[in-house]
Amino acid sequence: MQERGDGKIINVAGMIAFSGPADKSLMPRRAVYAGSLAHLVAMSQALGAELDGTGVQVQVLCPGIVATEFHSRQGLDLSHAPRMSAEDAVTAALRGLEVGEVVCAPGVEDTRLLDAVFQADVAAFGGQSTALASRYRAN
């Protein structure tokens, strides 16, 4: 793709990627799944930055619950839960590529929420030091 100067990579994660700090009462037993999806978000963002200017676009699609056989094949009945159609998720991904989104969250109307998360990530990364933070020093 880089040699051609054109290509698109769409990774599929989910909004559960952003659930790490959520209390276990809200979302129990999600560590491996949510952690894997959070990795996919971070990896896609880093790869997108690395490939910027090459003609290769990277996106990670983060829908909420999508109406597919994913849950029923696990024996879970989510018929009572509101779900996005697969068609809407695909439409969002393709439109997101057109507008240059690396993280496409089709169910998030207020993109300032996502921007705040990403700005906080970069700020935390930039706020590091080689000195031990005062909260870890002996009194």
Image (cartoon, grey):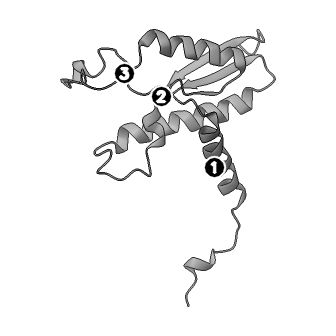
Residue 123 lies, with reference to residue 81, above or below; the image says: below
What is the x, y in percent for residue 118? 64, 43
Mark on residue 48?
none
Q: Secondary structure at mark 3?
A: loop
Q: How would you rate the neighbour count of disc 1 (Cα within 10 Å): few for under 14, some for 14-19, many for 20 or more?
A: few
Q: How would you rate the neighbour count of disc 3 (Cα within 10 Å): few for under 14, some for 14-19, many for 20 or more?
A: some
Q: How would you rate the neighbour count of disc 2 (Cα within 10 Å): few for under 14, some for 14-19, many for 20 or more?
A: many
Give the amino acid at mark 1: Asp
What is the x, y in percent for residue 56? 72, 18
What is the x, y in percent for residue 15? 46, 33
Residue 119 lies, with reference to residue 44, above or below; the image says: below
**Residue assigned mark 2:** 13
Q: Depth check: 56 or 90 in front?
A: 90
**Residue assigned mark 3:** 83
Q: Depth check: 94 or 139 in front?
A: 94
Front tag of 1 and 3: 3
- CB of mark 1 within 8 Å of CB of mark 2? no
Q: Depth check: 27 or 79 in front?
A: 79
Q: Residue at x 65, y 56 (%)?
A: 124
Q: Residue at x 65, y 27 (%)?
A: 102
The answer for how far apart the CA atoms under marks 1 and 3 are is: 29 Å
Extreme-bottom residue of the structure: 139
Q: Quadrant of residue 54?
A: top right
Give the amino acid at mark 2: Ala
**Residue assigned mark 1:** 121
